[in-house]
Amino acid sequence: MKQVSATVISNEKLWGEFRLHGRPKYSGTWLMWLKCPDVTREAKPGQFVMASCGEECLLPRPFSIHQVNDKGIALLFQVVGKGTAWLSRCKAGDMVEMFGSLGNGFTIHPTSKKLLLVAGGVGIAPLRFLIDKTLEQGKEVTLLYGTADRKRYSTSPQIKLVSATEDGTVGYKGKVTDLLPQYIDGADQIFACGPLPMYKTMAQMPELKDKPVQISLEMRMACGLGVCYGCTVKTKAGLKQVCKDGPMFELSEILWDEQDFEC
Ligand SMILES: Cc1cc2nc3c(=O)[nH]c(=O)nc-3n(C[C@H](O)[C@H](O)[C@H](O)COP(=O)(O)OP(=O)(O)OC[C@H]3O[C@@H](n4cnc5c(N)ncnc54)[C@H](O)[C@@H]3O)c2cc1C
Ligand code: FES
């Protein structure tokens, strides 16, 4: 884990305000590339960084490592509050203080050949890096990608992409979890990142009961280092900290009904 001053290479708005039932839900999704050789060298799919987001934010904010290349790392983020709004205003050449890479990351078993990935909205963020890495390893990847409407982030062309949109503008009309049961058979491992209701639906699916399913859990984080206990989650193996023991957990390990998820 390194504390670094990362230089913004580029910061691009991918799409604008998203409205749900006529009300603004968030105001833009951004792709930021950062030059930070120390973090880039260490990064593993599923890990995250804690980024300082300007003077107004006392605490750094967690973001998944979305992509890695020889220039640096990319973050894909939705503007939901003052920290992400600050990040969206950064321009090429600006500095972002951060530390990482943090967390356990996804575990890819060497014997797994067929991987099934499930993304809900900006949950695509950590999965893109996983796709790139597993394609390098010769795995076969299917991505079920659910968003609210036709605005969605393009993924690697070498995978099978199955889309679902809540308004039916692209692919299946409905939730990505509706599609899941028909793709489970034959998948050696399943990886998911999305909102809490998506995980709760998955946790109740009988088809997933005996399958290895790794999920990326999002909790509000203060320190990101296992010090403050702010991100504690109840699991079958006791209390765990999402920043230190996660953010990847087995879906079946989480005691979904026994905790208040704030996020
Ligand atoms: C391990 C991890 C990886 C993450 N990766 C990404 C990512 O790749 N892209 C991305 O857009 N977001 C990601 N998040 C969520 C991101 O950290 C929050 O959206 C961000 O901290 C909000 O900061 P803010 O100052 O803009 O909003 P705030 O003003 O702090 O809060 C605004 C709203 O966002 C909600 N929120 C705040 N923190 C979180 C959180 N940790 N998780 C979910 N909702 C939150 C609040 O409940 C509130 O409703 C990740 C979170 C974790 C824990
Ligand atoms: S954020 Fe402090 S212990 Fe996890």
Image: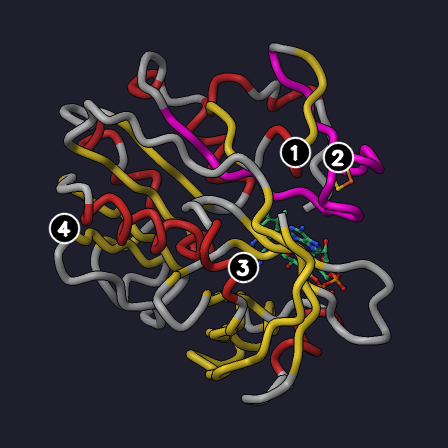
CA–CA distance between discs 3 and 2? 21 Å
Q: Which residues are magenta?
A: 213-236
Q: Quadrant of ligand 1?
A: bottom right
Is ligand 2 closer than 8 angstroms to the Cβ of mark 2?
A: yes
Judged by depth in the image, the label closer to the viewer, 4 or 3, is: 3
Judged by depth in the image, the label closer to the viewer, 1 or 3, is: 3
CA–CA distance between discs 1 and 3? 20 Å
Query: Pointer 2: what residue?
Result: 226
Residue 35 location (% of width, % of height): 51, 73
| Image quadrant in which you'd find residue 44 | top left
Main SS of the magenta part reads loop
| Disc 2 packing (10 Å; few <14; some 14–19; many ≥20) | some
Q: Vertically, is 195 above or below 186?
A: below
Query: Pointer 4: what residue?
Result: 160
CA–CA distance between discs 4 and 2? 37 Å
**Residue type, mark 4 in image:** Lys
Q: How is the image coloured?
A: secondary structure
CA–CA distance between discs 2 and 1? 5 Å
CA–CA distance between discs 4 and 3? 33 Å
The dot on residue 244 is: 1
Task: Say whether disc 4 or disc 1 marks the residue closer to the N-terminus.
Answer: 4
Instruction: Locate residue 9 relative to residue 1 in the image: left or right.
Output: left
CA–CA distance between discs 4 and 1? 32 Å
| Image quadrant in which you'd find residue 235 | top right
